[in-house]
Amino acid sequence: MSDYQFVTIWNIDASVERVWETIENVDAWPEWWKGVLSVSELKKGDESGVGSIRRTVWRSALPYRLEFDSEVVRVDKHKLIEARAFGELDGKGLWQFEAVNLDRTRVRYDWRVRTTKAWMNLLAPIAGPFFRWNHDTIMRWGEEGLKTRLGL
């Protein structure tokens, strides 16, 4: 397996509540996030979402798809969402939300994963930079889609 650590920061000209509501509603991601092909709820969580499991299929900028499940393990409303990923990727993701002011939110996403697909692990020594570029592209699509979804 190959390990990857990514940090993405978005600065969004909207309130933390609006940004939170849009990102927290994972089921709607395919409507606005170009890289998300589908989201399927496999298990309901508690009222905050902890314990929920969703399967997400991602389209990448490179010619491949990824499918993995995510279980929400921690939620602090309007501050953070942490999830454990397993399947074709194994690791964890942490969304952090910071209200810079009433109409500006800083979003930080930390993604620490290992690839489990044999071909990705085989190519990792040479393809690692392409996988990083691909991740950055997918996250840029997310930022652009979020801004459009929020009418910015």
Image (cartoon, grey):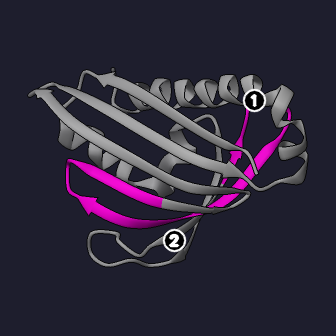
In which quarter of the view is residue 16 placed? top left
In which quarter of the view is residue 62 placed? top right
Q: Is residue 46 above or below residue 118?
A: below
Residue 125 position, x and y percent, is 83, 31
**Does 143 lie within the magenta span?**
no
The amino acid on which the numbered mark 2 sits, given as a three-letter code, is Ile
In which quarter of the view is residue 138 placed? top right
Looking at marks 2 and 1 on the same chain, the residue that comes earlier in the sequence is marked by 2
**Nearer the observer, 152 or 12:** 12
- Residue where numbered disc 2 is placed: 53
Residue 43 position, x and y percent, is 51, 79
Horizontal relation, residue 93 to residue 96: left or right: right
Instruction: State which region is magenta.
Output: 57-83
Name the mark on residue 73.
Answer: none
**Nearer the observer, 73 or 49:** 73
The amino acid on which the numbered mark 1 sits, given as a three-letter code, is Gly
Q: Is residue 71 above or below residue 65?
A: below
Horizontal relation, residue 138 to residue 148: left or right: right
> Which residue is found at the position 44% from the left and 73% from the top?
52
Magenta-drawn stretch, dominant element (helix, strand or loop): strand
- Residue where numbered disc 1 is placed: 128
Residue 141 position, x and y percent, is 56, 27
**Nearer the observer, 65 or 117:** 117
Q: Secondary structure at mark 1?
A: helix
Horizontal relation, residue 13 to residue 120: left or right: left
- Please name which of the two marks, 2 or 1, marks the residue nearer to the observer: 1
